[in-house]
Image: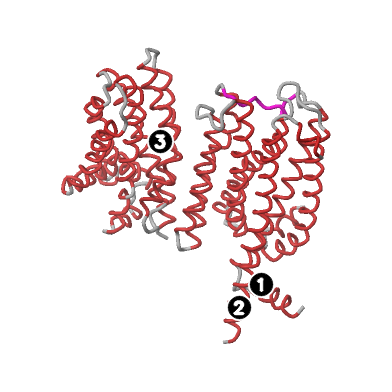
């Protein structure tokens, strides 16, 4: 079998391509991260709370700011490819389109989600959260942002042909992310209060698996319909 | 009719029934107005193409 | 029977059949609603636990039932439109969305009004049924927003149908949330295996309200679908003859 047609090569080359493109365009990669840091840093100024209250609201706030800054990057997921014509190549390629959409989603998570995960122990300091709590937060965010990438790619592929699509995209994706927001924040709060957070992780993992099972296929179908 | 205001929580119950009928009324008005609007629009478009 | 269903999928037949059905559905629905309201407000006895405030059930349950039923209807017609490409199904999905949104809003408001005397609060974020019903309202809005922003009608139909199907998981979540999580809502009283666990004198107005509101909702849905069908088929001959005939009559 020709090695250039294999699914694995299709997957890795798409991921590599996205990473290379983002390396050239560093500001696109850094700006959401900076936004995340700035907004979470300015919130403690806006609310004059004492230490224990801040650490109580910290997980939820960091979660929602992560979701919002993540959503900003989602509208570009397929748009750049549509603009320079690569989307048509992907539609015509011999690899199954769901593999390619999953590759793009995975690359998006590496480029946008992982930086947020790596930075969040730093941001957790603003909210007077202890280090081990911030590690649990980072863990929940890592699975959570992956699930968010998956769900967001469905939204991105559906809104590809609309103008001003980043607001519409956020409108469509935010309601669907409410369950994972609730459980992500709840997991960290459970750990903060001393209970075991394993049940929360089960739910986040289940949500992520559920999204994984249909997101590449739905995105592929929406991309095909959108470019007929 | 007046003795029914002595029901406990009367204002809650009556306001929810009122809202129910309001929503039904608004939906009916919207649907009929949509019907009229589409009829008029289609008629206009057909008349335009028929003149040719 | 199958011939009837096949005929129904053809727009001109659908138009004539629904024109006949609409007044019957609307009038029967209104009669049942009126009976249910009078019975529920004045004839049914007060509840042992909740006193008279429980009577909100007679508007809350029909609204919530219809909100879920509409979403399911939209999901089914989306599947029919995507797989079998029956154009009428697209018209039904489009027409059902605003009605579904209104009834979801009604369910949320009446539920909130009921919650104040019962649970002491207008809203409770921890309750899974409230959150998932609110999520369904957002799904309706998202559908209407997506449809409005895509200019090509065929693409708009297909992409928003996909959106409806993605969100369809929410309907079983709403229904079973009272069993899966501990919640302020009570578990189901009507759809139980050994019959409803509610007193008959309270059950009759409730059933009357549910059926009446459903029939009235169907009449509104048919009115909107009729308009949508005419709009979509405006270049076809049967529409021209229909409107010419209406003009000359």
- Spot the residue most to the bottom: B52
Neighbourhood count class around disc 3 (C-alpha, 10 Å): few under 14, some 14–19, many 20 upward: some
* Alpha-carbon span between mark 3 and mark 2: 49 Å
Percent of width and height locating residue A216? 40, 42
Residue carrying label 1:
C239
Please check whether the numbered discs 3 and 2 fall on a single chain: no
Viewer-nearest residue: A191 or A82: A191
| Mark 2 residue element | helix
Q: Chain of mark 2?
A: B
Q: Is residue C67 left or right of residue C163?
A: right
Q: Residue at image x 66%, y 45%?
A: B19
Q: Which residues are magenta?
A: C183-193
Answer whether labels 3 and 2 touch (C-beta < 8 Å): no
Q: Is residue B37 above or below residue A9?
A: below
Q: Chain of mark 3?
A: A
Neighbourhood count class around disc 2 (C-alpha, 10 Å): few under 14, some 14–19, many 20 upward: some
Q: Is residue B43 left or right of residue A81?
A: right
Answer whether labels 2 and 1 touch (C-beta < 8 Å): yes
Q: Chain of mark 1?
A: C
Residue carrying label 2:
B46
* Alpha-carbon span between mark 3 and mark 1: 46 Å
Q: Quadrant of residue A140?
A: top left
Residue carrying label 3:
A212
Viewer-nearest residue: C165 or B2: B2
């Amino acid at each position: 079998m020709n090695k250039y047609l294999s699914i694995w090569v299709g997957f890795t080359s798409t991921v590599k391509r996205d990473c290379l493109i983002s390396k050239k365009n560093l500001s696109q990669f850094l700006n959401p991260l900076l936004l995340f840091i700035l907004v979470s840093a300015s919130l403690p100024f806006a609310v004059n709370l004492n230490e224990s209250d801040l650490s109580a609201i910290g997980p939820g706030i960091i979660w929602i700011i992560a979701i919002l800054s993540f959503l900003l990057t989602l509208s570009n997921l397929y748009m750049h490819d549509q603009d320079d014509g690569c989307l048509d190549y992907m539609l015509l390629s011999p690899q199954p389109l769901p593999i390619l959409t999953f590759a793009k989603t995975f690359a998006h998570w590496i480029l946008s989600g992982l930086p947020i995960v790596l930075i969040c122990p730093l941001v957790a300091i603003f909210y007077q959260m202890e280090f081990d709590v911030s590690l649990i937060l980072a863990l929940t965010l890592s699975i959570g942002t992956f699930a968010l990438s998956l769900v967001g790619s469905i939204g991105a592929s559906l809104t590809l042909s609309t103008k001003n699509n980043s607001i519409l995209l956020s409108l469509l994706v935010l309601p669907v992310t409410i369950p994972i927001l609730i459980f992500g924040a709840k997991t960290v709060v459970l750990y903060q209060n001393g209970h075991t957070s394993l049940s929360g992780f089960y739910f986040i993992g289940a949500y992520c698996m559920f999204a994984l099972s249909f997101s590449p296929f739905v995105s592929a179908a929406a991309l095909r319909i959108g470019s007929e | 009719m007046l003795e029914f205001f002595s029901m406990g929580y009367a204002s809650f119950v009556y306001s929810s029934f009122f809202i129910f009928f309001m929503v039904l009324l608004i939906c009916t008005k919207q649907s009929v107005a949509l019907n009229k609007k589409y009829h008029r629009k289609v008629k206009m478009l057909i008349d335009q193409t028929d003149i040719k | 029977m199958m011939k009837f269903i096949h005929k129904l999928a053809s727009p001109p037949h659908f138009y004539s059949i629904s024109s006949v059905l609409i007044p019957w559905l609307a009038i029967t629905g209104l009669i049942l609603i009126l009976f249910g309201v009078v019975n529920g407000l004045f004839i049914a006895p007060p509840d042992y636990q909740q006193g008279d405030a429980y009577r909100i059930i007679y508007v809350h349950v029909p609204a919530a039932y219809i909100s879920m039923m509409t979403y399911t209807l939209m999901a089914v017609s989306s599947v029919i439109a995507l797989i079998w490409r029956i154009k009428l199904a697209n018209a039904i999905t489009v027409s059902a969305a605003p009605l579904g949104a209104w009834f979801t809003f009604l369910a949320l408001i009446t539920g909130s009004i009921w919650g104040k005397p019962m649970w002491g609060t207008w809203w409770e974020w921890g309750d899974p049924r409230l959150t998932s019903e609110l999520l369904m309202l957002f799904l309706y809005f998202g559908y209407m927003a997506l449809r409005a922003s895509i200019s090509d009608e065929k693409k708009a139909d297909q992409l928003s149908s996909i959106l409806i199907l993605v969100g369809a998981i929410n309907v079983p979540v709403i229904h079973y949330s009272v069993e899966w999580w501990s919640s302020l809502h009570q578990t189901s009283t009507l759809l139980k295996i050994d019959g409803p666990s509610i007193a008959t004198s309270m059950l009759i107005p409730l059933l009357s309200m549910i059926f009446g509101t459903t029939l009235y909702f169907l009449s509104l849905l048919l009115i909107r679908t009729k308009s949508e069908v005419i709009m979509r088929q405006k270049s076809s001959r049967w529409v021209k003859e229909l409107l010419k005939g209406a003009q000359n009559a």
